[in-house]
Amino acid sequence: MLPSPLLAAVDDVYIVKQAEGLPTVSLGGTVIPYKEVTLAAQLPGRVKFLAGIEGDAFEEGDVLVSIDDSELLAKRQALIAQIATADAQLRNAGVQYSRELYSPRARSSPGGMGLPNMFDQFFTRPMEDFVGDRDQDAEMSADLFASGTQIQQARNTIMQLQAELRGLDSKLRDARAIAPFDGVIVKKFIEVGDTVQPGQPLLNYADVEYLQVEVDIPARLRPGLQEGMMLRAELDVPSQMGASAPGDADGVPVRVAQIFPMADPQRHTVKVKFDLPQGVSEPGMYAKVMVPDYNAPARVNPVIPRSAIRFNGSLPGVYVLDDNGNPQLRLIRVGEPTPRGGVTVLSGLRAGERILANPGPGIATGWSREGNPDR
């Protein structure tokens, strides 16, 4: 009997094969940015500047948020004036020290008898030194020490004010939220005019040029993973660079970037991050990663192309060719996808049978109960 003219070409016939290699487990995860930070307020105040909204891109060093710093600027001006006063006091103390050094008051002040200075110098002070009532050298040393103390106090005052100025400048820097790297605003929590307090979140800022998939992997699968190994993943959205969505055959390659050193004590899972190619997804999307299971036995289930599956309502089926080349629709039970774009069949097919790899509409079929999982 000749084959029906509605059948596909011979090239579209696929011979069912056994699965090869280790079985894989499909684990769901979330696409996350490579780097993400939450910028928070460091001091209280009113928001006077907001650089943009969600999705706006900025470069490293750009100002993202600015808080009103009028009060801090006024305090800074007051501190600068105090530093100038302390500097004048330091210079005056230095002049007084030099005066005491070259023209000591202990030798030029009037005597205790109220006589003219010459009489005091020649008669009164020598007599006081002779009887032990006065020691000019001790007085001169004390005056020099007092002048030196005034110099040191003035220096200490300047150092204290300069330290306060550095602290105030640090607060002025904290009044602005600066972009720590090239990225975009992911989420903003404030608007211009809002009053914020220290610790209050301002923005979520992230680098979305490079993305990762974060997956919680059961601890039993952890020994089969090593940093740098390549796996396959399925994404929610089609890739802009030709990679596939979940319904397509190939998926996208992902690389094991980081394996966290400690498992979750409640869920007994290990967090693993996978690097994604550029331009294949967006942050927050759902993704499935095919993780090899080295503890499971080798595959014994048949593997077929995903394009061969057609749905009769909600039940999956394939077109199986009989001995005469006529297609028969047979229901199957689908298992896990394979790394190369196929899918395993738990029941309904045997290795060696012929099926249509990509059946089109309008194929005249009969029903086959051979291998039907529901019979």
Image: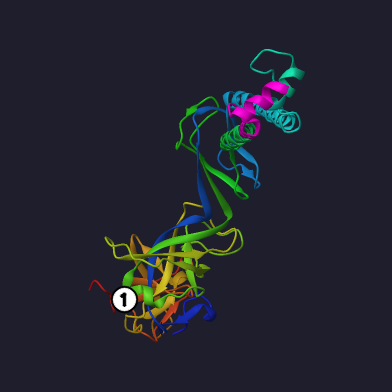
> Looking at the figure, which quarter contains the N terminus?
bottom left
Q: Is residue 189 left or right of residue 23?
A: right
Q: Crowding at label 1, few (<14), some or many (≥20) Cα neighbours within 10 Å?
A: some
Q: Is residue 146 magenta?
A: yes
Q: Is residue 189 visible?
A: yes
Secondary structure at numbered mark 1? strand
Quarter of the figure with residue 80: top right
Residue extending furthest top? 114
The residue under the point 67% across, 24% down is 125
Magenta stretch, main secondary structure class: helix
Q: Position of residue 242 (x, y in %)?
A: 60, 64
The residue under the point 76% across, 32% down is 102
* Range of magenta residues: 123-149
> Looking at the figure, which quarter contains the C terminus?
bottom left
Q: Is residue 152 left or right of residue 329?
A: right
Q: Is residue 332 visible?
A: no
Q: Is residue 69 left or right of residue 110?
A: left
Amino acid at dot 1: Leu
Front residue (pair 250, 361): 250
Q: Position of residue 12 (x, y in %)?
A: 51, 77
Residue pointed to by mark 1: 346
Q: Is residue 264 magenta?
A: no
The residue under the point 50% across, 60% down is 212
